[in-house]
Image: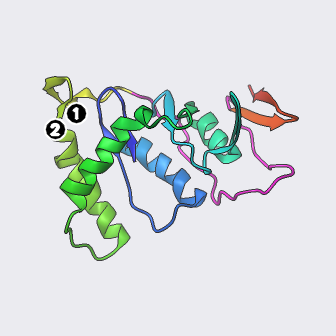
Amino acid sequence: MLVLSWSRAGSARFALDQTLESFLPGHVQAFAALQGVPRTILYDNLKSVVLERVGDHIRFHPHVLELAGHYHFAPQPCAVARGNEKGRVERMIGFLRHAFFAARPFSSVADLNTQLTRWIAEVAHARPVPGRREQRVAEALLDLVLPADPRVRDQPRTHRGGIVPCRATAGTRMTSWKLGKAVSLVTE
């Protein structure tokens, strides 16, 4: 589930697992559905995103950083034990659970996702924006620009240490952690 803070527009999809191979394409699908990319994405401290946290130092998963570099968004984890930072997403999940999912028949995950996409467009985005009741969520969507090459690696895989292979393209910004220091590589 991805929820835009200002408009409350959202995108969601169901999957049979919580692997990185499902998580990253979910971002691409959300960006396409919302027709843009937010500047910052706030994440819960899930292991698919945050590999390690020592004080203020955060080590992100390299594939998340690659996706962030490609789409030019900043990944930002929630503070530890601060549930109030993700209230918009939690409310949207509750809304989805009660208004969409309860007693809904479906034949497959693909069928459920097709129904969900239609429901988001017809119901969730038709509701008023909280605090601006005269405006609908669909009207409040910001103009965000997708990169020219919307892609995720063909088969993203989790690497268990050592060197993480990656491919840099023109204009890509990547961050790597080595010896506890962040190093940014920008290609021109």
Q: In the image, what residue occupies the spot 79% across and 57% down?
A: 160
Marks 1 and 2, the one that precedes in the sequence: 2
Measuring from the top left, give residue 119's x and y in whole percent. 21, 53
Q: Where does label 1 land, which residue?
A: 137
Measuring from the top left, give residue 100's x and y in whole percent. 22, 57
- In the rendered view, would you say 111 is above or below 99? below
**CB of mark 1 within 8 Å of CB of mark 2?**
yes
Q: In the image, what residue occupies the spot 19% across and 69% down?
A: 103
- Tell me: 43 left or right of 4: right
Measuring from the top left, give residue 134's x and y in whole percent. 11, 24
155 or 99, which is in the foreground? 99
Under mark 2, the amino acid is Arg
Membership of 97 in magenta stretch? no
The CA distance from mark 1 to mark 2 is 6 Å
> Which residue appears farthest toward the front when viewing the image?
81
- In the rendered view, would you say 44 is above or below 173? below
Q: Where does label 2 land, which residue?
A: 127
In the image, the segment drawn in magenta is 144-172
Looking at the rendering, which quadrant does residue 77 occupy? top right
Measuring from the top left, give residue 17's x and y in whole percent. 51, 66
Q: Is residue 35 visible?
A: no
Q: What is the basis of the colouring in this image? A: rainbow
Q: Main secondary structure of the magenta part?
A: loop
- Tell me: 7 left or right of 44: left
Q: In the image, what residue occupies the spot 35% across and 43% down?
A: 90
Under mark 1, the amino acid is Val
Membership of 151 in magenta stretch? yes
User: Helix or strand or loop: what does disc 1 sit on?
Assistant: helix
Q: Is residue 121 visible?
A: yes
